[in-house]
Amino acid sequence: MAFEVPVRQNEKLKRLTERINQDQELWQWWRSANVNAIDRQGMSDHGEVHIRIVANAALKILRLLLEAGIKPSVEVNYGLSPEDAEVVVVLGACLHDVGMSIHREEHELFSVALGYPKARQLLEGLYQEPTLTIMASEILHAVIAHRWDIPCLTIEAGVIKVADALDMTGGRSRIPFEAGKVNIHSVSALAVDAVNIEKGEERPVKIEIIMNNSAGIFQVDELLKRKLQNSTIYPYVEVVARIEGATERRILGVYKL
């Protein structure tokens, strides 16, 4: 399955996605990340499906922020364009977990080490110096800052930090848990049916999480909440979690951050 995002009129993003789809090394990193995550540790997917989900979520969040008049950091600090910010979040999403191909522990650092030459390679010809170095630095900042406790200093990094946490439907929890073991981690991972990203009523971005069981609150509270609160986009995002279905005793109806 090809890597796809809605490029719209962004020619640089279009050319980047073409290069990503032709890059055998990058695709093998994603596959090897899953060998370490799924096959060897019984964790959730960190490969190409996860990357596709995060990239599309990040791009959607960024565009909603742009529509609300919020300027991305590459524009504020370097005079670049919103289209360049889209390139940052998409390539940052593609590189954020490649370090998992080496090890789960400190994989963010490994992702930076692998990601620096790869970012420059994929952007070569799309940008000239010194903009090429600026773009690579911004992308790597987003990569290292996707860990919840590392401060992010840009809008783009905050977007990727939050988007990474949104891959939680149907057992795709970002919280590590032992496969086959029944506990709050495994139960809550199966409780989320859908994650919707749309224009907010009170803030520029609304994230709606549809659950079949209130155990899914654990996913929202333990992962999404802490990532969102440690991101640069916290003031611009509202989160609503809803429990739907008649098969569960309704403990609560709506949970808001």
Image (cartoon, grey):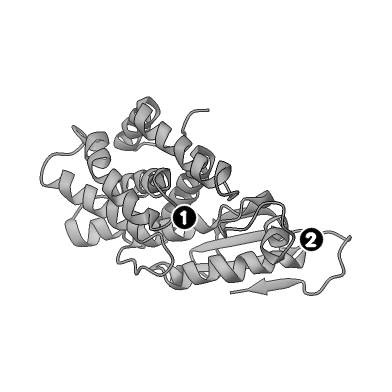
Residue position for label 1: 61
Amino acid type shown at disc 2: Glu
Q: Amino acid at mark 1?
A: Ile
The residue drawn where x is 37% and y is 27% is 24
For the residues marked 1 and 2, what is the alpha-carbon distance in whole angstroms? 24 Å
Q: Is residue 5 left or right of residue 143?
A: right
Please identify the residue farthest to the front as the structure is shown: 40
Q: Is residue 5 visible?
A: no
**In this orientation, which residue lies closer to the viewer: 111 or 59?**
111
Q: How many residues crowd mark 1 within 10 Å: few (<14), some (14–19), many (20+)?
A: many
Q: Is residue 56 above or below residue 191?
A: above
Q: Position of residue 23 (x, y in %)?
A: 35, 28
How many marks can you see?
Answer: 2
Residue holding disc 2: 244
Q: Residue at x 67, y 66 (%)?
A: 241
Locate the C terminus and report the quarter of the image it occupies. Answer: bottom right
Residue lying at 48% horizontally and 68% vertically, measured from the top left: 228
